[in-house]
Amino acid sequence: MNNEQFLEAFQQNYNRVFNYMGGGDLKLLISLACKYTLAEKQFNGVQLQKVCEKLEDAGKGTFSIPKYSTVNYRIASHLIVEGNMEKTISDIIINDQFLKEAKFKKSPFRGIGALFLQEDKQQQHAERARKMYVEMNRNQRILTTNGDIPYIVFLTSNNENDPLTQAQTIYKYYQALRKQKFVMGNQLQALAQIMTIYSSVYNEILLQYVLQLKKELEKRGIKVKKMHYPFIGVLAMAATNASKIDEVIQLHNQLLELKVFKTAKYYALIVAIQKIIRDTIEIQEIIDLAPITNLPQLVELLDIAEMLVEIGRILPGGISEVADFFN
């Protein structure tokens, strides 16, 4: 759909979300409206509530996500737009148990990570994820928290990558980005993780590309915040050029004209990036000539980044940043 169609559908879905929930967490309302609009679905509050209840009932006593939490709504909406909910809910509960056996602590983040555990090799995948987590924790002891679990699970899907090497490369990217005035913290660590999705080998060209993307956004008047870092990573992995950045900025500016973004203006860039990346994937599927063969993976990365935008980590940002500084 073009920008005008997207904006109209987004506003209609936002109105449905707002009317059903009666207001509340603005970022969650925007998130739900965006997810349903990108999936070209009409928001159905009753259906969403039923899936939330099924998740809570299926995982009672073991699953770590409360029925009416922000995380539960985000996972439930993910399941709805992906389809095949009954099987997926069962898989999530099973996968969460594998992550538990791999000594990941019970938390909402473990529940999100369970979405991305490989179906056929859960135990091996969970063990690889644990190895990466332990190594990341060794490099950034306090900064590495349960909030990293979803990214770690996703990034260890490829069993050809050595999790120890990948963790060390993440640390190198993190330190290099810090020297380039990226703000320290969890979001920067997420960006560094995303940069290893295609290769666990450190790549100076990729680092310069990420820096250039940030500069291009700022050149066009965007105030890049920490919350945007993971999404810049996805733009880099999608080989985004200046033309695509222009498309992102155009949609971003159109979104800012909607009343809902007046008090959530920094979220407009996140919505715009999601839309443009998905448009790129659709074009690839039509012409089958795109140079990036793993673009569908980036949709899942976008889902993870979007789910974690407003979910608090175990440590407040200030504490994690001070700890990072002393590390």
Image (tube, rainbow, N blue to C red):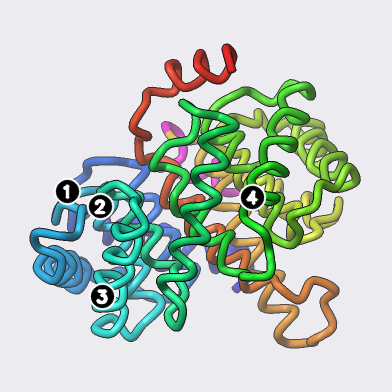
* Mark 3 or mark 1, earlier in chain: 1
Q: Describe the element under mark 2 as helix, strand or loop.
A: helix
Give how far apart the Cα atoms at labels 4 and 1 are.
Answer: 47 Å
Residue 257 locus on image (x, y percent): 54, 43
Q: Which residue is mark 2?
A: 18
- Location of the C terminus by quadrant is top right
Residue lying at 52% horizontally and 33% vertically, measured from the top left: 186
Q: Which residue is mark 4?
A: 164
Q: Which residue is mark 1?
A: 22
Q: Which mark is residue 91?
A: none
Tag 1 near tag 2, CB within 8 Å:
yes
Q: Which residues are magenta?
A: 254-263
Give how far apart the Cα atoms at labels 4 and 3 are.
Answer: 31 Å
From the viewer's perspective, is 132 left or right of 242? left
Q: Describe the element under mark 1 as helix, strand or loop.
A: loop
Q: Describe the element under mark 3 as helix, strand or loop.
A: helix
Residue 126 locus on image (x, y percent): 44, 63
Q: Out of 150 and 122, give the one closest to the viewer.
A: 122
Q: Is residue 128 above or below residue 86?
A: above
